[in-house]
């Protein structure tokens, strides 16, 4: 093997080489993806309908780069409403085949379709008549001939300069896995609230939570009778800590007094009633509004507190902008 040169290249020449190589890699893979989008596997629709009707899960397997891509495909399927998990084909040969049942469907990934390590998995699938999808660029390979559904990839050049490192082929496999997941989402009518069930943690989970997940309830609400005097209103605003007082009449909101209303009426503050300075049309939201939407509304209206109400305008909660920001809602 020839030694790899360690001589420092000219900085300008190196920059040109790097940018040219990077741009060409992306261009090669982009052309391949465009070709795939216009030439989807003929078995794709049948495979999706089969997945929609199974009682079990999608079992994904592969090794090497195909294994890495397979793990991501399994994770994407699982997080978008299609039960799935990845089984390493080497581990499958040492007991994990017991994880695969007749209620499942397998997705085997091998660009050549002749991966030795998939042999035991393939034998198990055929022995127990378990449906199988194969992803490969070789439709005449052993794996693809055994597949129930052949998700054949176009045989296009790899993006690497020597044509051997899995680049284009893995990009196409990943894109096809995403296509499976998204098509299944469409067929299931998968909604943002469904997505939240599988992503309860982190910033993404916070964005997909609803106002009901953050609102303060019960005795936390700064509610006042509409006939209350200003001293009572000030005490309520101070003790509840939201900077607002909600004026009520017959269990309905008739106005909200804020810190801003107090500042605007400072000269005659103790000579007026809260009902005289309160906003009769406060901004309110329903409890099922997404937290991200509520935060956007607060920013647009330049307010820091939202009242959460029923369809009959009865207050059931209150939420402060800091509740959203602390949870990572953006």
Image (cartoon, rainbow, N blue to C red):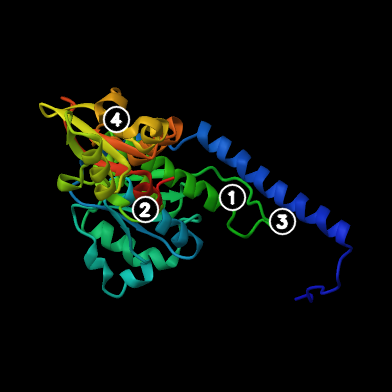
In the image, residue 179 above or below residue 68: above
Q: Quadrant of the C terminus?
A: top left
User: What residue is at 38 percent from the left and 42 percent from the top?
Assistant: 180
Residue on which disc 1 sits:
168
In the image, residue 228 above or below residue 54: above
10 Å crowding of disc 2: few (<14), some (14-19), many (20+): some
Which of disc 1 and disc 3 is earlier in sequence? 3
Farthest-out residue, left: 250
User: What residue is at 75 percent from the left and 76 percent from the top?
Assistant: 1
In the rendered image, residue 277, in percent from the top left (x then y), is placed at: 32, 26
Q: CA distance from mark 4 to mark 3?
A: 83 Å
Secondary structure type for disc 3:
loop
Q: Which mark is residue 161?
A: 3
In the image shown, does 15 or 308 lie closer to the viewer? 308
In the rendered image, residue 296, in percent from the top left (x then y), is placed at: 42, 35
User: What residue is at 44 percent from the left and 38 percent from the top?
Assistant: 41
Residue on which disc 4 sits:
271
Q: Which mark is residue 327?
A: 2
């Amino acid at each position: 093997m020839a030694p790899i040169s360690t001589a420092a290249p000219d900085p300008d020449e190196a920059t040109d080489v790097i940018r040219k190589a990077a741009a060409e890699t992306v261009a090669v893979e982009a052309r391949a993806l465009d070709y795939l989008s216009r030439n989807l596997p003929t078995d794709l629709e049948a495979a999706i309908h089969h997945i929609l009707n199974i009682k079990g899960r999608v079992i994904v397997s592969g090794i090497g780069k195909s294994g890495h891509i397979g793990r991501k495909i399994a994770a994407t399927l699982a997080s978008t409403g299609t039960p799935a998990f990845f089984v390493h084909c080497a581990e499958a040969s040492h007991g994990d085949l017991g994880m695969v049942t007749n209620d499942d469907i397998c997705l085997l990934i091998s660009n050549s379709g002749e991966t030795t390590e998939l042999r035991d998995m393939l034998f198990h699938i055929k022995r127990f008549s378990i449906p199988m999808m194969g992803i490969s660029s070789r439709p005449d390979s052993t794996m693809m001939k055994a597949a129930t559904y052949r998700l054949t990839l176009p045989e296009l050049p790899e993006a690497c300069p020597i044509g051997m490192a899995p680049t284009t082929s893995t990009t196409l496999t990943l894109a096809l896995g995403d296509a499976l997941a998204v098509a299944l989402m469409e067929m299931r009518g998968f909604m943002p609230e469904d997505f939240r069930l599988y992503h309860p943690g982190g910033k993404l989970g916070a964005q997909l939570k609803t106002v009901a997940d953050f609102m303060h309830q019960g005795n936390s609400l700064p509610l006042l009778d509409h006939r209350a005097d200003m001293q009572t209103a000030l005490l309520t605003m101070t003790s509840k800590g939201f900077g607002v007082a909600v004026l009520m009449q017959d269990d309905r909101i008739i106005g909200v007094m804020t810190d801003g209303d107090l500042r605007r009426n400072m000269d005659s503050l103790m000579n007026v009633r809260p009902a005289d300075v309160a906003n009769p049309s406060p901004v309110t939201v329903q409890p099922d509004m997404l937290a991200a939407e509520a935060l956007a509304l607060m920013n647009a209206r330049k307010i820091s507190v939202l009242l959460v109400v029923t369809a009959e305008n009865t207050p059931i909660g209150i939420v402060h902008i800091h509740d959203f920001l602390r949870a990572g809602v953006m």
